[in-house]
Image (tube, coloured by chain):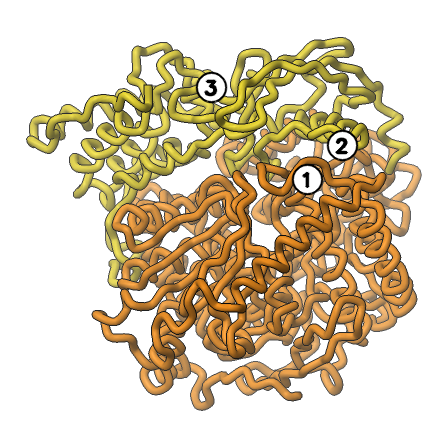
Chain colours: A yellow, B orange
Amino acid sequence: MSAHASEHKTMNLTLIVWRQAGPNDPGRFETYQARNITEHHSFLEMLDVVNEDLIREGKDPIAFDHDCREGICGMCSAVVNGVPHGGQKRTTLCQLHMRTFKDGDAIYLEPWRARAFPILRDLVVDRGALDKLIQAAGYVSCHTGGVPDGNAILVGKREADYAMDAAECIGCGACVAACPNGAAMLFAGAKVSQLAALPQGQVEAPDRVAAMVAAMAENGFGNCSNHYECEAACPKGISVKFIARMNREFMKALFLDKIGALPKPSASAG
Amino acid sequence: MTLDGKAPTGRIQDSWDTHRFESLKLVNPANKRKYKILVVGTGLAGASAAASFGEMGYNVEAFCYQDSPRRAHSIAAQGGINAAKNYPNDGDSIYRLFYDTIKGGDFRAREADVWRLAQVSNDIIDQCVAQGVPFARDYAGYLDNRSFGGAQVSRTFYARGQTGQQLLLGAYSALSRQIKAGTVKMFPRTEMLDLVVVDGEAKGITVRDLVTGEIRCHVGDAVVLATGGYVNVFYLSTNAMGCSVTAIWKAHKRGAFLANPCYTQIHPTCIPQAGDYQSKLTLMSESLRNDGRIWVPKKKEDCKKPPNEIPEEDRDYYLERKYPSFGNLAPRDIASRAAKEQCDEGRGVGPGGRGVYLDFGAAIKRLGENVIRERYGNLFEMYERITAENAYQRPMRMYPAPHYSMGGLWVDYDLMSNLPGLFVIGEANFSVHGANRLGASALMQGLADGYFVIPYTIAGYLAQTKPGKVKADAAECARSIADVKANAEQLLSVNGKKTVTEFIRELGTLMWNNVGMARSEQSLGETLRKIPAIREDFWKNVKVTGKGAELNQQLENAGRTADFIEFAELLARDALHRNESCGGHFRVEHQYPDGEAKRDDANFTYSAAWEFKGVGKEPELHKEPLEFENVHLAVRSYK
């Protein structure tokens, strides 16, 4: 297959990459060259090429998160030229292809930067805070077994499609990284909306929204001030209408007296 | 040794219910919390099992190598999940799903296990709906179905092109609920690197914390492996980058039998490879074959022409021609081989002539572009992002790619391996798919095992064992930790000249060329001669930078690659020993004149379970005979 790589025109790029050995080490930018990259390389395959060169030189390769490389697992996460996932609409970093760059380009690479996501190494961050939000109440509390037939409770196509629009979230955290407040409102709003739209999730809807809003504050996320950077950065195009839905669900819960005193953001998280 | 799968006897329709009542003991609710279960892997099988154990009151520790359990590769399954609901009233039944799965697997799976899978398939759909999984619905609010390969009924439930994602998020949410409740303790970014066996029973695992590099031992009363498949042994596959054979290989090296490793599935519709640098292949859902028609040019000289310039009469819709009753929905192994055959004859399209067209032109004309966009929009977008081609205007190019492993650790009917206390579920075991898996059945198996089988069968083992028998200070734990540490130090100390990627590429290319879609005595013999050389070269020449006590992705990859190299030898050996063709295992010596796979039922109606005897040493073969009492062994025909 090597013949095909040579059929394509190749490009050389300069990468300016955030390097940080560990959570408590100071970070800095380092400059590397990416050579002989074709337009068919994905962004992460371009990074593979750079890392192979670094290893051969005996240097530590750039650590970055990635797994499925087909845009669905939500593991890949880096800010490219200031934009999470690199700014191609509805595209994760692993699906961004080098045909969107040109020979000689300089590319800045940084990790997700948010109070709730401590840096572990280079471009790898700890997104456990998002799991904490789901653990707070992002589920329907049904046990295994003992549930009704799948067709026993009808779900309108409109509601099912709306729930699916929200459920497409891959939990990558780009919305948090893009938000000037480091808020997880789009992530939480999508889950609250998905489950509130379905009859199966409606019973717990007020308690769910109360618990998830409280968990956002506890885990170091900021609040929404309507910048909409989250939707712009979201590789799945999750709409900010789900934030509005969460706010409405929160108001409902307030009237139902489900909202206790919300915790203040912890000092350590700041 | 002849292995006993302990499948229940008697009427198959009653087998699971009878077995649950008569053979499986229960653990008293108050005693459940005294038992600790270790679950490795949090995909559909692992997450659903861990959540169910937690709900039942067991003490659970769950492990995954990703940063969150929500990212396991089950998430990438696109098309759907099968169940025998018969909602469309098109003649489906538990019996038919059972029959299709046995036949689809080319008569190489245990009947009772497959029956149970078909039986609980309906419960899975109900469970997922209750969790808030947004399955596709029709305008009246009922669940919608579509068709998949190897079946003539519509039994596949789906959530757009992201069914695996939605089912996994359902299981992940159930797991999250148990983490919050404190019944499950979750260890993300943690990789299992050894199985701890005490007095012949699995009682713990040794893991590496992928952030700090700490190597430590966890002990429990039972270990459940749900660590997925091994087709990254071919390097380029549809699996995630982190998918590896490591967990099941380490268990194999500690005594667990590995069964039918040569049964690997090559998925017919993947985006063809574009260059050497490529790190993975991307699958396009089998559901596309509901509306897409597969063809190649009849004349070799047309292959370089733009497809729309090739007139209808010069196109060969070879699946429709060869398999008129199943057409484009022929099973995966058959569709993959047919594509390879066309390309080998010089009628392939695209770079290197390794591609066939998947054409939506007729469907767009019949249904309109909007309907096609509604059904498959996300897949068309994905195709365009990767290839820069618009599939609404020109047919997609497809080529087969390694996708799934039917083989895995040997388990009995209770999903327990030959090592008491070691259970294996989902793709990691060998149980239900025989020599070929039908589309939309992997999700079904993962959730069947996790929600509805292992919660019962594990009690049968635990009820007969005293809780907390093995403590963390056991000598076996210390030995295991020392072994894992020594292995890591060895990898770091070689300091050779070749990167880990160079080795896995070399191995993968050898395996794909010689042990891929077509295998022969000659190609397998050559492979078995070459692998030891790769292994030796690896331990002399690999270069791994950095230290053990830090986040070190090269060290992770090096360990996985070392295991793949050892495992590849077993895979090739199994393929050589199985001197017949069946399902995904195609030996060129054994085919009918029309190129179909030719089984040898007289000699090979058994599962081959291999026992480890040392690296580079010949493993010992144990056979589990397969008996077919409900489905007659027949030549598998989709014509």
Cα–Cα gap, marks 2 and 3: 27 Å
Residue count near mark 1 (Cα–Cα under 10 Å), binned few <14, some 14–19, many ≥20: many
Residue drawn at point x = 54 percent, y = 12 percent? A82
Badge 3: chain ID: A
Find residue A115 and report its horizontal and vertical position in percent.
39, 21
Considering every residue shown, the one lying at the far bottom of the view is B10
Chain letter, disc 1 residue: B
Real-space Cα distance between discs 2 and 1? 9 Å
Q: Could you tell me if the residues under marks 1 and 3 are in contact, i.e. CB atoms within 8 Å?
A: no
The kind of residue tagged 1 is Gln
Residue B543 lies, in percent from the top left, at 78, 40
* Vertical placement of residue B407 versus B45, above or below: below
Q: Do the CB atoms of the residues marked 2 and 1 lie less than 8 Å apart?
A: yes
The residue type indicated by label 3 comes to Arg
Q: Eyeballing the image, is B461 above or below B321?
A: below
Numbered disc 3: secondary structure: loop
Instruction: Say the numbered circle drawn on residue B554.
Output: 1
Disc 2 designates what residue? A55
Q: Nearer the viewer, residue B494 or B631?
A: B494
Q: Is residue A141 visible?
A: yes
For label 1, the SS is helix
Mark 2 vs mark 3: which is more N-terminal? 2
In the displayed structure, does residue B570 sit left or right of residue A218? right
Determine crowd level at label 2: few under 14, some 14-19, many 20+ residues with C-alpha closer than 10 A: many
Q: Secondary structure at mark 2?
A: helix
**Residue B304 percent coordinates (x, y):** 87, 33
Do we see residue A88 in this rendering? no
